[in-house]
């Protein structure tokens, strides 16, 4: 890594399942037309706000169900229109940043509030706010050997949109019952849009996480509850380590679902669970021709060490199944091809804000550019399998009890984009040309379909850091972009587009 920096995200140095008839299928996400110009907000096709009566009574509840755009939606849409002026106090905030870790951090600069208890969360929950959850103290060390606290940049962007921000440093709180019970925490988090930030641990290695505060088991519990609460929550965004944790959590939920389906009265549901277990056991994750995970219960199935550390600006392009995917005539290859086919079919009928941004930029002969800063990645094979499994479970919805948590699972997970090199680089003596795919699963969209009226909701996860710039420095160490520069920057616009999609 340039400048002798430490590795980011290193610890301390650190035949498809049978389908129901079309009338019983969950609705697939519609195509969303891209906006005519990149300076305009990307329009989203939306159904009417859903009735919550069909949802599980054990799920958390939002304090209100608006029949219009939420405050984050309105503010983000105005920000994207390029007509907005900087909100009151924004200039003063920018002036307070870039002065170092003492003067320009949470608690000193007017970024927002630092939450240390459930009581604070309960008192301050409001839809006009963005909550940022930190699983670790920082997201990595940059070329200047600085610890990068990316949450500062998210708060700065929120302030640019006229939204208040708060940070929940899970790494400094004793998490879990009785100090921070996950069920009560989720009841608070669903009331605002939530950004889950990055960090140093390796998802596949429990020992790299904090033990006394934010452990891997705590994060799995928290993210399971959040993923299953999207029908009552605001937008959920998972970045870097949290992108990896969300992918791992989805695999854990698939394991839970197999057990739940086995207990169902429906023979069709039982058969789907059996098929998921069979296919999951056959999926292999390979890197550079070597199998690094055999079966969906392997520790490194969801995530594994990246072939190369990425710490630079990369181009984002639409996902295409890797050419290295096993093509041999084997039962392992057949299982993976089944998952690939399901994902390809699903992707043909789905669009979201990130796809629309990529399409707009490609139409001008350019590409979206974002900051990558990681040493671990989500495995392509794992997410192709996860989508197929979720799609199979969705096909059995009609046979599930009305209150089953399985009904709150995403109906699909689409791998949206992959990163490509912006320039030629030398990797271990091998010249890698610009345009070569670097990270296959750079971002994903989790799709949900409301049982009552088919309303669609989405959450997003990304390996890259849309809140950071090419310097990979946080707003404590460098003066951040000005208001008009924020409006024009790819990563920041992407976050604003996602917030504008909030329901």
Image (spheres, helix red, strand yellow):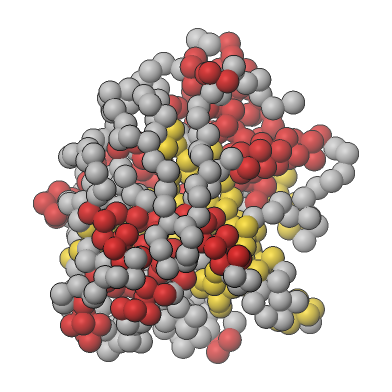
From the viewer's perspective, is 208 left or right of 113?
right
From the viewer's perspective, is 32 left or right of 104?
right
The furthest residue to the right: 329
The furthest residue to the front: 36
From the viewer's perspective, is 462 left or right of 306?
left
From the viewer's perspective, is 378 left or right of 88?
right
Q: Position of residue 215 (x, y in %)?
A: 39, 53
Instruction: Report the front residue among 69 and 495.
Output: 69
| Residue at x 41% of width, y 52% of height | 43
Q: Is residue 200 above or below residue 211?
A: below
* Figure label count: 0
Q: Is residue 131 above or below residue 411?
A: below
Image quadrant in which you'd find residue 172: bottom left
Instruction: Report the front residue among 481 and 438.
Output: 481
| Residue at x 42% of width, y 48% of height | 44
Q: Is residue 245 above or below residue 358?
A: above
- From the image, which quarter does the C terminus lie in? top left
Image quadrant in which you'd find residue 306: bottom right
Q: Position of residue 411 (x, y in %)?
A: 50, 34
Whether residue 215 is visible, yes or no, is no
| Residue at x 57% of width, y 32% of height | 391
Q: Position of residue 468 (x, y in %)?
A: 43, 74
Instruction: Report the front residue among 73 and 78.
Output: 78
Q: Position of residue 69 (x, y in %)?
A: 26, 48
Whether residue 70 is visible, yes or no, is yes
| Residue at x 53% of width, y 18% of height | 23
Instruction: Report the front residue among 272 and 137.
Output: 272
- From the image, which quarter does the N terminus lie in? bottom right
């Amino acid at each position: 890594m340039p400048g002798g920096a430490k590795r980011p995200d290193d610890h301390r140095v650190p035949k498809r399942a049978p389908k129901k008839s079309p009338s019983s299928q969950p609705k697939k996400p519609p195509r969303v037309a891209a906006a005519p110009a990149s300076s305009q907000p990307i329009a989203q096709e939306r159904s009417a706000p859903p009735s919550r009566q069909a949802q599980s009574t054990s799920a958390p509840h939002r304090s209100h169900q608006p029949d219009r755009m939420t405050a984050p939606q309105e503010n983000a849409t105005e920000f994207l229109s390029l007509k907005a002026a900087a909100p009151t106090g924004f200039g003063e905030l920018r002036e307070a940043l870039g002065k170092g870790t003492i003067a320009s951090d949470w608690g000193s600069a007017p970024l927002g509030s630092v939450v240390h208890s459930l009581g604070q969360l309960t008192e301050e929950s409001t839809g006009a706010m963005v909550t940022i959850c930190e699983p670790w103290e920082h997201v990595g060390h940059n070329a200047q050997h600085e610890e990068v606290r990316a949450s500062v940049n998210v708060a700065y962007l929120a302030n640019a949109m006229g939204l208040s921000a708060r940070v929940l440093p899970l790494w400094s709180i004793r998490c879990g019952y009785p100090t921070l019970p996950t069920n009560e925490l989720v009841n608070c988090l669903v009331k605002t849009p939530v950004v889950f930030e990055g960090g140093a641990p390796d998802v596949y290695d429990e020992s790299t996480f904090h033990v006394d505060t934010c452990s891997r088991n705590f994060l799995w519990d928290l993210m399971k509850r959040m993923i299953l609460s999207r029908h009552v929550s605001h937008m959920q965004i998972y970045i870097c380590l949290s992108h990896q944790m969300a992918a791992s959590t989805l695999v854990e939920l698939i394991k839970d679902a197999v057990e739940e389906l086995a207990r169902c009265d429906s023979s069709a549901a039982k058969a789907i669970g059996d098929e998921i277990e069979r296919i999951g056991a056959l999926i292999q994750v390979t890197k550079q021709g070597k199998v690094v995970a055999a079966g969906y219960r392997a520790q490194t199935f969801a995530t594994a060490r990246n072939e190369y550390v990425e710490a630079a600006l990369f181009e984002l392009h639409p996902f295409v199944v890797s050419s290295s995917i096993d093509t041999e005539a084997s039962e392992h290859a057949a299982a993976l091809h089944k998952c690939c086919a399901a994902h390809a079919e699903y992707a043909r009928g789905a669009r979201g804000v990130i796809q629309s941004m990529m399409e707009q930029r490609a139409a001008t002969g350019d590409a979206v550019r974002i900051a990558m800063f990681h040493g671990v990645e989500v495995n392509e094979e794992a997410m192709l399998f996860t989508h197929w499994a979720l799609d199979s479970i969705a096909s059995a919805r009609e046979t599930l009890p009305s209150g089953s948590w399985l009904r709150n699972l995403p109906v699909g997970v689409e791998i949206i984009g992959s990163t490509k090199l912006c320039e030629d680089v030398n990797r271990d003596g091998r010249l890698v040309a610009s345009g070569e795919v670097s990270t296959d699963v750079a971002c994903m969209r989790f799709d949900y379909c409301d049982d009552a009226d088919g309303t669609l909701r989405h959450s997003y996860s990304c390996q890259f850091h849309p809140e950071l710039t090419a310097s990979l420095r946080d707003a404590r160490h460098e003066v951040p972009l000005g208001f008009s520069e924020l409006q024009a920057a790819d990563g920041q616009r992407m976050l604003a587009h996602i917030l504008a999609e909030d329901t």
